[in-house]
Amino acid sequence: MRAPAPATTLLLSLLGAVALLPGAHSARAETAQAGNLRVAFNGALSPKKLPRRGVAPVSVELGGRIATTDGSDPPALSGIEIAINRAGRLDPKALPSCSLERIQPASTAYARRVCAAARVGEGSFSASIAIPEQSPYPSQGTVTAFNGREGGRPVVLLHIYGTEPVPTSFTLPLSMSRGRGRFGTVLRGELPGIDAHVSYVTGISLRLGGPPRARRRPYLSAGCPAPKGSSLAVFPLARASFSFTGGPTLSQTLIRSCTARG
């Protein structure tokens, strides 16, 4: 059953929580800072043992946290960009696609049911929402990623759903394009105007890739680019860039390792 459409201001406020901040489940984190604004990035690849030649199904965990050093509210996010290492392949033709109209607005349960075959990831978000004459209200919810199409081109649809203080649903399309140099696929998303005095993001996590055993042709796959004579490769897993309204753009490259087999 579809969730009720929320107030526009609150809906756009929660949208700020979907900034794909690479990797909350990794013990290792990289930090980017400008002034008092700080973004802590994390990321992890699973499995770490991959073919030296060719590719195998993988999943990537992305997540992180936005904060300020003085405890003030951070500015609102205006855009995000995630570049994935060229050794990884994201194949939108591997499974059916879902349309934005089918899952916006909708609850997490409804979206996952009607677009089950297009589901490619899941995670969670947390945000803080300012309520007049009250202390900021903490909000948490789910993030679900679907393989989608928009304007005839492949996209990743991030469906965001929270239940407090009221049911709120929004879907953010991430465009997909070819990268350059060390990065093979670039995901980009532009956020609409958000009132920074209403809400700010505090954290996000996302596992992208889906259950590889259920698909003959995996959505996300990778190989291990280990040099000849070595079984270990150290490589840039992903590069993330975050633009903030009235503020800077913070970027960080996540360096990880893998073990080659074969």
Image (tube, helix red, strand yellow):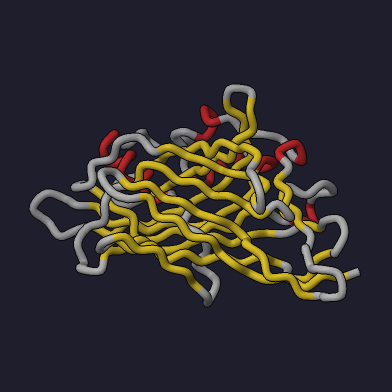
Where residue 149 appears, x then y in whole percent? 62, 30
Q: Quadrant of the C terminus?
A: bottom right
In the image, is 197 to the left or to the right of 143?
A: left
> Going by the picture, which residue comes out furthest to the left?
133
> Going by the picture, which residue comes out furthest to the top?
151
In the image, is 92 to the left or to the right of 70?
A: right
Q: Say which residue appears at 33% left-offset and 55% top-offset.
A: 201
> Going by the picture, which residue comes out furthest to the right?
262
Query: Please, is residue 150 above or below residue 75 in the view?
Result: above
In the image, is 245 to the left or to the right of 106?
A: left
Q: Say which residue appears at 66% left-offset and 40% top-offset.
A: 118
How many marks the image carries: the answer is 0
Query: Please, is residue 41 above or below residue 152 in the view?
Result: below
Is any atom of residue 54 visible in this view? yes
Is any atom of residue 209 visible in this view? no
Q: Say which residue appears at 37% left-offset and 50% top-offset.
A: 249
As rendered, which of 124 and 62 lies closer to the eye?
62
Residue 54 placement: quadrant: bottom right
As rendered, which of 261 and 137 lies closer to the eye?
261
Where residue 69 appears, x then y in whole percent? 25, 69
As rendered, which of 168 and 60 lies closer to the eye?
60
Where residue 103 appears, x then y in whole percent? 52, 35
Where residue 230 appears, x then y in whole percent? 82, 75
Residue 180 placement: quadrant: top right
Q: Say which residue appears at 37% left-offset and 58% top-offset.
A: 126
Query: Please, is residue 214 above or below residue 194 in the view?
Result: below
